[in-house]
Amino acid sequence: MKKLFTVFLVLVLLFLLTGMATAHENFIYDLESSDVFMYYVTSIGEYSDKIYCEAYHATAGYYQQSLELELQKEVNSSWEKVTSWYESGYTTGLTIEEFYPQSPGTYRCKSIHKAGGETKVSYSDTWTF
């Protein structure tokens, strides 16, 4: 039964990723996994002249978990925080999807995924506007 549930979640994920990739003008993402996390990802892109930031993860079970997404801008060869968003709950996954006004520069998104005693940090690719 657990294997069937996992297969179902993977199929749903593939469906969602296909839909998200076509719903955004420009979009970059890269899935990672661990023992607790079936997947976790951070992405950045552009949509309607706004910076698009997204982070999400799914876990192998119900856990108290949190997700923090931070938009960073490159300034003098280092990364400075522009803004951040936070979600938490007792669930099997969390998602943050936000838009930020676009201004010239190079940006990336950083996420901190926490669940089941694991902490994972993921980064998007850089994006220049």
Image (cartoon, helix red, strand yellow):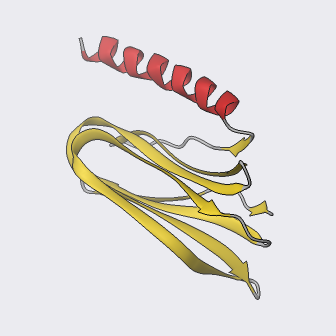
> Can see residue 62?
yes
> Can see residue 65?
no
* Residue 18 image-quadrant placement: top right
* Residue 9 image-quadrant placement: top left
Query: Where residue 26 sits: x, y (%)?
Result: 75, 43
Query: Where residue 25 sits: x, y (%)?
Result: 75, 40
Measuring 42% from the left and 43% from the top, which residue is drawn there? 57
Quarter of the picture containing the C terminus is bottom right
Measuring 54% from the left and 50% from the top, which residue is drawn there? 54
Measuring 36% from the left and 20% from the top, which residue is drawn there? 6
- 91, above or below 112, in the image: above
Left or right of 106, for residue 97:
left
Measuring 68% from the left and 38% from the top, which residue is drawn there? 24
Query: Where residue 1 sits: x, y (%)?
Result: 23, 11
Query: Where residue 58 sits: x, y (%)?
Result: 37, 38
- 12, above or below 86, in the image: above
Left or right of 60, for residue 50:
right
